[in-house]
């Protein structure tokens, strides 16, 4: 306990660095996964390939990816760009499946009605499909956000600052409280980011009633349980 | 690119390949850890998941345990157990099982809990005992979901086993950490490639088994 009280500054700095790595990766996951999922949902044939590919990327262990990715990016292993890119890649791989399911679940009658009313492909996507898929997209993004936050610490093995440094430093110096503080802080960051996403969802989708969200949550929970 | 060539040279060098410290032995060790941890997680998780799934109870507990497992940083769990149990294999093994358990539990639970009520009721009406309903109706219908859970567990352990060398265990992570310490980038790339290859081969193997299992399961089975 004394370690925690003596090192509040270190913990706060590491937490902030952690958030700065996780948030861009979560944003990238969403922005990249939605167009890819649109392709997967629009063209049946591409769906199988895209989802298989996404699954394979997600299967790759994180430490090896942190080491291999610089070969492609041309950055150093310890570069923040490398870490965010690797985290983003996992996020995209996980998000694509949720987003493809979310877009598939939009009623085709509604899409056809929009087409009949003269909506072009862009307007149809942004004004009809995206808002209707919104709640399911949010549910998927919450899973992605939590797993991104919990993945960041691995980068500490390369020497990148995040809450993961509390694990490496605590282990090497044999400070139990430091490792424990790191775990608790990581979980707290995950919970706070998750709550932030829920609030963002309420702001952007005020029309969603909580009851509907519950039914949907059950579906995503079921899927997320098994793809954990 | 030159690093990639250097990595491939490192892998093909007989001195790095064979022997008790060669990458082939470390790979076997890595797979051994993965197999042991997965089997232990299955032995605990499948009966438990089936029991609560059959009873349709404790859904919230299962959902929150998988949610919590996702939020837990694996490196934190590995180092925490490393400090508690000391250097060696005990700590990482316990961490592997802990991290693999929620996926297996959830897969077993979701498959059985999601079995169509009509089929279960029909089985009961035909006079099947609860044990027969579980083993002959719910468990076969839940096979694809259980397999999905085991697949996540295997990949999770494979990834975490890479971190185990940090707390003194063996496996392919040995080369990664040795490479990090000695700034030997080709060695790090080489061992990373082997781990990635293992993960991809295992994932594809599960994909094939998944297809075979799905083909043998009748329509109406709970989907993932």
Image (cartoon, helix red, strand yellow):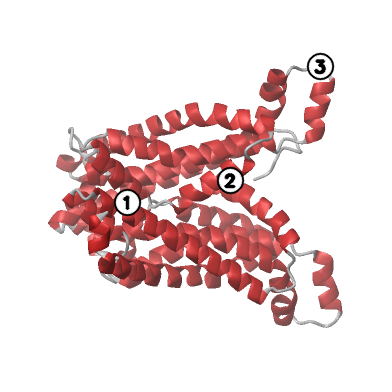
Same chain for mark 2 and mark 1? The answer is: no
Badge 3: residue crowd in 10 Å (few <14, some 14–19, many ≥20): few
Residue located at (73% from left, 68% from top): A208
- Spatial CA span between label 2 and label 1: 24 Å
Position of A93 with respect to B34 (left or right) is right
Of B24 and B105, the residue lying toward us: B105
Residue depicted at x 49% and y 60% = A191
Q: Which residue is drawn at 72% across and 26% down?
A: B137
Q: Which of marks 1 and 3 is in front?
A: 1
State if disc 3 and disc 1 touch (CB < 8 Å).
no
- In terms of sequence position, does the residue under pointer 3 or pointer 2 come before the other? 2
Residue at which label 3 appears: B127
Q: Which of the chains bears the disc numbered 2?
A: B
Q: Can you give x and y, in whole percent of width and height, for residue A99 in the image?
A: 62, 63
- Label 2 residue SS: helix
Q: Please tell me which residue is depicted at 33% across the width and 56% down the height of the picture.
A: A182
Locate residue A112 relative to residue A172 in the image: left or right: right
| Neighbourhood count class around disc 1 (C-alpha, 10 Å): few under 14, some 14–19, many 20 upward | some
Tell me the mark number nearer the camera, choosing from 2 and 1: 1
Along the line of sight, which residue is nearer the eye, B93 or B170?
A: B93
Compared with B125, A130 (above or below) is below
Find residue B33 and report its horizontal and vertical position in percent: 34, 34
Residue A180: which numbered mark, if any?
1
Reply above or below: A204 against A91.
below
**CB atoms at circles 3 and 2 under 8 Å apart?**
no
Instruction: Let me know if residue A217 appears in the view.
Output: yes
């Amino acid at each position: 306990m004394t370690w925690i009280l003596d090192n509040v500054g270190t913990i706060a700095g590491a937490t902030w660095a952690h958030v700065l790595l996780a948030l861009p990766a979560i944003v990238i996951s969403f922005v990249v996964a939605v167009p890819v999922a649109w392709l997967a949902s629009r063209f049946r044939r591409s769906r199988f390939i895209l989802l298989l590919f996404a699954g394979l990327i997600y299967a790759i262990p994180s430490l090896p990816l942190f080491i291999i990715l610089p070969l492609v990016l041309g950055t150093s292993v310890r570069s923040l760009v490398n870490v965010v890119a690797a985290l983003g890649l996992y996020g995209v791989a996980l998000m694509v499946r949720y987003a493809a399911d979310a877009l598939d679940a939009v009623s085709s009658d509604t899409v056809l009605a929009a087409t009949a009313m003269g909506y072009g492909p862009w307007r149809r996507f942004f004004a009809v499909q995206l808002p209707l898929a919104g709640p399911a997209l949010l549910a998927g993004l919450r899973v992605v956000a939590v797993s991104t936050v919990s993945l960041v610490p691995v980068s500490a093995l390369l020497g990148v600052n995040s809450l993961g440094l509390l694990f490496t430093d605590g282990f090497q110096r044999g400070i139990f409280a430091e490792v424990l503080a790191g775990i608790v802080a990581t979980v707290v960051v995950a919970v706070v980011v998750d709550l932030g996403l829920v609030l963002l969802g309420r702001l952007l989708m005020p029309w969603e009633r909580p009851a509907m969200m519950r039914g949907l949550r059950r579906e995503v929970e079921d899927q997320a349980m098994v793809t954990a | 690119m030159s690093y990639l060539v250097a990595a491939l040279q490192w892998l093909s060098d007989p001195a790095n390949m064979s022997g008790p410290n060669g990458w082939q032995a470390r790979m076997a060790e890595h797979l051994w850890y993965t197999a042991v941890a997965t089997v232990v997680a299955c032995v605990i998780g499948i009966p438990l998941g089936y029991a609560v799934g059959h009873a349709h109870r404790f859904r919230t507990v299962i959902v929150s345990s998988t949610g919590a497992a996702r939020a837990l940083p694996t490196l934190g769990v590995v180092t925490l157990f490393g400090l508690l149990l000391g250097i060696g294999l005990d700590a990482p093994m316990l961490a592997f099982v802990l991290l693999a358990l929620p996926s297996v539990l959830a897969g077993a639970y979701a498959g059985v809990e999601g079995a169509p009520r009509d089929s279960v009721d029909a089985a009961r009406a035909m006079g099947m005992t609860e044990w027969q309903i579980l083993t002959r109706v719910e468990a076969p219908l839940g096979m694809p979901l259980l397999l999905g859970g085991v697949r996540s567990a295997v990949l999770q352990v494979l990834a975490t086993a890479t971190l185990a060398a940090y707390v003194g265990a063996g496996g392919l992570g040995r080369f990664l950490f040795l490479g990090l310490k000695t700034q030997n980038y080709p060695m790090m790339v080489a061992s990373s490639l082997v781990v990635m290859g293992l993960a991809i081969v295992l994932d594809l193997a599960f994909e094939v088994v998944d297809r075979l299992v799905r083909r043998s399961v009748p329509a109406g089975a709970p989907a993932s």
